[in-house]
Structure formats: C-alpha cells, structure tokens
Image: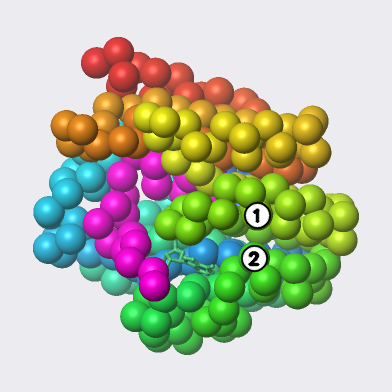
C-alpha cells in the first residue's frame, strides 16, 4: 500500500536540485536536431498547487523554490519551465518532473511515464492527456526494463522513487545496470534522499562500482522541520551529458551558501 504523496514536498529544496538538473539536461539534449525519448519510472501527479493544504502544512515549498528562485537567471531552463507552467496553469502552481519534461520537449520527442498510486495516476493521466504522453499505472522499474532501448534511441530516464519500499535501495542499482546494458546511450538520472542514517550508502557504492564514470552530485540543506530525517539529496547520472558537471558545481555552490546562512 503506497502512502507517499509528493504534494507535501513539491517545490522543496530536493525538488529544486532534481528539477533544475533535469531541465538543464533536457535543454542541452534538445539543442541537437534529433528526437529524444523521455522515460520516468516514478512520475507523481505532474502538477502541484503551492497554496494547497498539503504544501502549507509542511511549508517545504516556501523554504524551497519560494526562497531560491533567484538562483536561476530568467533564461535558465528550470526558470523557463516554471514560468511556462505558471502561465499555463496558474501562478500558484509548481510542475512535477513530467511537466518539466513535457514543456521542455518537442513534438518529435516521446514520453513514457509510470505511476503506481491510483489517485496520483488518475491526476497524471488527466494532466498529460493533452501532451501526448504514454502514461502507465505499473511498476516503473518494470516499465524501464520493458521499454529499453526505446524509440527514438537517444534519451533520458528519470528514476525518482519514494523509497517507501526499502528493497528499492537494492533493486535500483541492479535494474539500472540491466537498463544500461540494453540502452548504452541512455542518460539515466537517479534521485535519492540523504537521511540521517544514510540508507543510500550501499546503493551508491553499488552504482559507483558499476558506473565508475557516473556523476554523483549531493547537496545538504537545513531539515524542513526539527527532527526531520532528510538533511540533503543526491542525484547519480549515468552517461552525464557534456557540461552537466559544471552545472552541478554551480548549483552546489548555491546550496553551500544557503547552508552557511
Ligand atoms: C517522489 S514521487 C515522484 C515525484 C516526481 N518524480 C516529481 O519530481 O515531480 C514518487 C512517486 O512514485 C510513486 N511510486 C511508488 N512506487 C512506485 C512504483 N513501484 N512504480 C511506479 N510509481 C511508484 C509514488 O506513488 C509517488 O507518486
């Protein structure tokens, strides 16, 4: 039984890290005139309201994108995606990763999204109906294995689990290794939380052993509230596009400045 709902966390500092890097990557890859596939294994509902009871209850968006929007110049791809979504869906909205991707992709690109939670899936299907995405209510890692290599072959896969099922930490590096064997040109981006008891460490060791050239980027931030276990977040990118390392360094410097107060 899945209980995680991203509405409580949308727009927090972990989303800022993940979504800014995703928007940058898609912007970079769409500069070449060849179509892309975008696959997302844990899509969520795709659109959030920063004035919802969930967002106001945690205050995470206010401490996140509400505080750090000016880290991004108006022409930064993340800032552009936020502006497009605000213009389309309302100023108080915040895009999930499917909508960051949809607004950054072109008509020739293809999107495949998996979401298992019934209500999140229903909201996502309705939202993405106009964007021509293939939306599936199925296990995202099973979809990843079934659809790779995708057509078109160039592309990005975002893996953004809620880690509610603790076996995710074991399963993810195995599935990523299988996917990379089948799809050696795919850019795979995994997001993970950094929690006080560091359950991500064995997963990261396995990923670094399989993908020694992978890009690991971690940021720390003040806990959302006293006693909150998440003290940072990370992404691990297999086949990082050229220039991503510089972009992560720039973003990392912003997070470091925030932590220093
Ligand atoms: C962290 S949220 C996704 C947020 C989204 N990627 C974004 O950045 O906007 C994780 C989502 O994965 C869904 N989920 C959990 N287990 C899943 C599975 N095995 N397959 C597909 N979706 C799953 C949860 O219901 C939840 O909506």
Within-10-Å neighbours for mark 2: few <14, some 14–19, many 20+:
many
Report whether the residue tagged 2 is closer than 8 Å to ligand 1.
yes
Q: Quadrant of the N terminus?
A: bottom left
Please say if 54 is above or below 117: above
* Residue in view at x 18 percent, y 60 percent: 54
Q: Is residue 201 magenta?
A: no
Q: Position of residue 63 (x, y in %)?
A: 21, 38
Disc 2 target residue: 141
Q: Secondary structure at mark 1?
A: helix
Q: Which mark is residue 12?
A: none
Question: Is label 2 or label 1 in front?
Answer: 1
Q: Secondary structure at mark 2?
A: helix
Q: Is residue 123 visible?
A: no
Please say if 116 is above or below 94: below
* Residue in view at x 48 percent, y 75 percent: 116
Q: Position of residue 167 (x, y in %)?
A: 56, 54
- Quick check: 16 left or right of 34? left
Disc 1 target residue: 171
Q: Which residues are magenta?
A: 1-22
Name the quadrant containing residue 101.
bottom right
Residues under numbered marks 2 and 1 in contact, where contact means CB atoms less than 8 Å apart: yes
- Quick check: 23 left or right of 154? left
- Quick check: 52 left or right of 175? left
* Residue in view at x 12 percent, y 63 percent: 53
């Amino acid at each position: 039984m899945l209980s995680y709902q991203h509405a409580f966390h949308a727009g927090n500092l972990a989303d800022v890290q993940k979504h800014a890097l995703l928007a940058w990557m898609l912007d970079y890859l769409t500069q070449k005139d060849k179509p892309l596939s975008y696959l997302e294994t844990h899509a969520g509902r795709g659109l959030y309201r920063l004035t919802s009871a969930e967002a106001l209850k945690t205050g995470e968006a206010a401490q996140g994108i509400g505080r750090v929007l000016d880290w991004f110049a108006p022409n930064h791809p993340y800032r552009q995606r936020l502006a497009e979504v605000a213009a389309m869906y309302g100023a108080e909205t915040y895009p999930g990763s499917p909508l960051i991707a949809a607004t950054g992709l072109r008509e020739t690109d293809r999107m495949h999204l998996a979401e298992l939670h019934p209500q999140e899936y229903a909201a996502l299907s309705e939202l993405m109906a106009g964007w021509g995405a293939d939306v599936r209510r199925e296990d995202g890692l099973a979809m990843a294995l079934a659809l790779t290599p995708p057509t078109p072959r160039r592309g990005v896969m975002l893996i953004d689990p809620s880690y509610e099922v603790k076996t995710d930490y074991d399963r993810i590096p195995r599935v990523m290794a299988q996917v990379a064997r089948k799809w050696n040109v795919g850019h795979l981006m995994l997001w993970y939380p950094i929690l006080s008891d560091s359950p991500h460490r064995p997963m990261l060791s396995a990923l670094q052993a399989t993908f020694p050239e992978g890009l690991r980027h971690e940021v720390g931030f003040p806990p959302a509230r006293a006693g909150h276990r998440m003290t940072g977040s990370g992404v691990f990118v297999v086949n990082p596009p050229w220039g991503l390392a510089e972009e992560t360094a720039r973003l990392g410097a912003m997070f470091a400045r925030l932590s220093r107060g």
